[in-house]
Image (tube, helix red, strand yellow):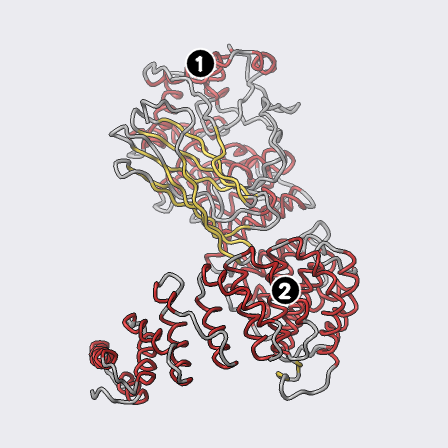
Amino acid sequence: MSPSVALQEMIRAIRSARTQCEERGVIQRECAAIRAQFRQSDNGGRSHNLAKLLYVHMLGYPAHFGQMECVRMIASPRYSEKRVGYLGAMMLLDEKQDASLLITNSIKNNQYVQSLALCTLACMGSAEMCRDLAPEIDRLLRASNSYIKKKAALCAVHIVRKVHDLGELFAPAARSLLAEKNHGVLHGAVVLITELCERNPETLERFRKTVPDLVQIMKGLVISGYSPEHDVAGISDPFLQVRILRLLRILGRNNEAASDAMNDLLAQVATNTDSTKTVGNAVLYETVLTVLDIKSESGLRVLAVNILGRFLLNNDRNIRYIAMISLQKIVGTDHNAVQRHRGTIVDCLKDQDASVKRRALDLSLALVSASNIRSMMKELLLFLSSCPVELRSQAASGIFNAAERYAPSQRWHIDTILHVLTTAGGDVRDETVPNLIQLITNASELHCYTVHKLYRALLTDISQQSLVQVACWCIGEYGDLLLRGECQETEAVQVSEDDVLDALETVLQSHMSSPATRGFALTATMKLSTRITDNVDRIRSIVSIYGSCIDVELQQRAVEYNALFKKYDHMRAAVLERMPVIEKNSPGHTNGESTGEPVKDIQPAKVKQGAPLLPQQPANQVCDLLDLLGGSEEPLQPSPAVAGTAPGLPANTISQAGGDLLDLLGGLEPAPLAPAATVPVYEKDGVTLTLSCEKQSDSGLTVTLTASNSSDSDISSFTLQAAVPKSVQLHMKAPSGDSLPARGAAKVTQMVVLNNPNKVNLKMRVRISYNSQGSAFQDTVQIDSFPGLSAAGH
């Protein structure tokens, strides 16, 4: 390629390259020719060569060797070379480059050269350059030339961002610029004032006096006729209107006088702006944000919500998306106004766009109330059956929360949760199963109905593990009600003992069943041995098969149950008695979630009157046998005598009683468990992270990180990443979830297993990432100490 080739020819040659290798060859040859001409003292094509180098830089290839040429061209007396030189400086230089210090002249030159210098300073000026040139910029803000004042205002914005202390210098000049008629100067002045108000509360109070001036400027734009210079799709200078509305939002926030002064203007803009064009929608959206952020009148807020409701009907998905984000922010304060658009919001659940669906789901769940729970739940369950896989967990969790808060009856509550488990049982949280079991246990009048419904669901589908686990538990507890076949709540179905055992054997033998599900099925089979009469030998045979199972947990259960058949058969009926009804003592916990209420100290579980009680036995013996089945997180009282004395027993006596049953397997003595200490390690913007540790061995440690959200905004895509010294082995288990509802409605736990064989000083760095209100946040916390561990151990 010839060194004198024109810019257009070089672009054509690069675009015609068939491979990346051929493109690199063209650029390397041209860069070599440009370097050679830069070294020549008498070079007439300097601007031509620098323009080509800038194009090479735009393509992502190195062009740093042209930095000094930019400085030389800025010093040139010819305007054509200065223009290209300043453009090159903006693209090739930044404040960290030493060459930027050589750009010293040009601000005191003619207006065109001044504008080039101001643009360059606004683009790459360092803090030192800003301090040196700030007085000169303030002088140019008062110049008579509107073109220079516009450029100086934008340059002042950059200076304020770089050096906050210089904001006071520009405040008087910025106030005077609001009297200008030139739209470019007004735009620069509004941007500058916005920057000053956001960074200094005192300046904000001072500029609140300009609200009437800004209102007059905005009114002039709204009622002005057609102006070819500023008209965009029938809207007079929408860019300036948007900037003024943003400034008014800042000035009117938490100030009643300023808000009153702009109420009439906002109503006028909201009613007179054309919403059929994208430009008009941009102005309306800023108007809505301003109305919702200031102390506006109630009628004006309703008007703003109605505008967002019209946005939901727009064909543009981006407009629908921002409308739902805005409605999500105000649904707590203007719930009734948002409720009027419930039908439109629910229709957005059928949108093809995944982002719109997610926002519509969040908003739909926020709109659920006691008055519309049935209709909204019908729509949400319909959405759950066809929603994308990535939204099922969020939808199921939201449905559980809504059902817990607003359920009109216990039967409706149970039916709703079973519907979710039937549809998306593989996507619900682990806490769902024990919470549903507790709900079923408390609804004593629905035991027959529930066990019949779950039995039919078990015969239909055993792929949903959560549903199968609850069904097995209910069949084991209430199998006698199932076999009796008398149920007033549902159609009577005659079920034989063999049918029930066949269903449980199918679960035990299915490749789709997880080890936990098989444990539920095996326990249910064992419990049926006291509820049926003719198939006890078959149950004994099923249990004995799993005594040699490869799964250790399942094998242990089977061995214990076999021992109960052979060695303790006289106590089997008492051990396998129906579980007592346990009252819910901690109101902070719901279906897989927790509310923001503080959790009180755990009290011993209370047994309702009328619940079947076990025969009188020594306290330690009966408690040991009850622990045979496992899985209970709360202490159970086998008799009134035990219940009355248990709270007064020493802690070591209770722990000793809980482990005596291990004598069945050889007289092992369990070590007493000490509660793990929990300490906060991070707290910022409402997000709190706590840490607890449990020492597994001399070098092993299990760390549990628990995150909660006390802010007013939901958090999604919550992830934790951990790093430890190289000699420490780290394994992070799957988290309990990836979303933190507002006001502590749920927590996310993350277990981290550490192995420290070299006994080095243990440290861990945790990175916290999440999305809130459409913005991504990331932070890092260093953990240097771990509670409950000795310095020698870790």
Label 1, residues with CA under 10 Å away: few <14, some 14-19, many ≥20: some
> Disc 1 designates what residue?
656
What label sits on residue 193 in the rendered view? 2
Looking at the image, which is closer to me, 10 or 344? 10
Label 2, residues with CA under 10 Å away: few <14, some 14-19, many ≥20: many
Residue 227 located left or right of residue 262: left
Note whether 699 is above or below 339 in the view shown: above
Note whether 14 is above or below 421 in the view shown: below
Looking at the image, which is closer to me, 514 or 192? 192
User: What residue is at 64 percent from the left and 74 percent from the top?
Assistant: 186
Write down the quadrant of residue 298 in the picture: bottom right
Q: Are marks 1 and 2 in contact (CB under 8 Å)?
A: no
Q: Nearer the viewer, mark 1 or mark 2?
A: 2
Which residue type does callout 2 highlight? Ile
Image location of residue 132, percent across then percent down? 48, 62
Which residue type does callout 1 highlight? Gln
Looking at the image, which is closer to me, 678 or 309? 678
Q: Element at badge 2?
A: helix
What label sits on residue 571 in the rendered view? none
Note whether 244 is above or below 48 in the view shown: above
User: What residue is at 55 percent from the left and 61 percent from the top?
Assistant: 160
Q: Alpha carbon of mark 1 to alpha carbon of mark 2: how far?
A: 72 Å
Image location of residue 21, percent across then percent down? 20, 76
Tally of marks:
2
Picture quarter with the N terminus: bottom left
Image location of residue 107, percent across then percent down? 49, 74
Residue 52 located left or right of residue 268: left
Residue 460 in sight in this render:
no
Q: Element at badge 1?
A: helix
User: What residue is at 40 percent from the left and 63 percent from the top?
Assistant: 95
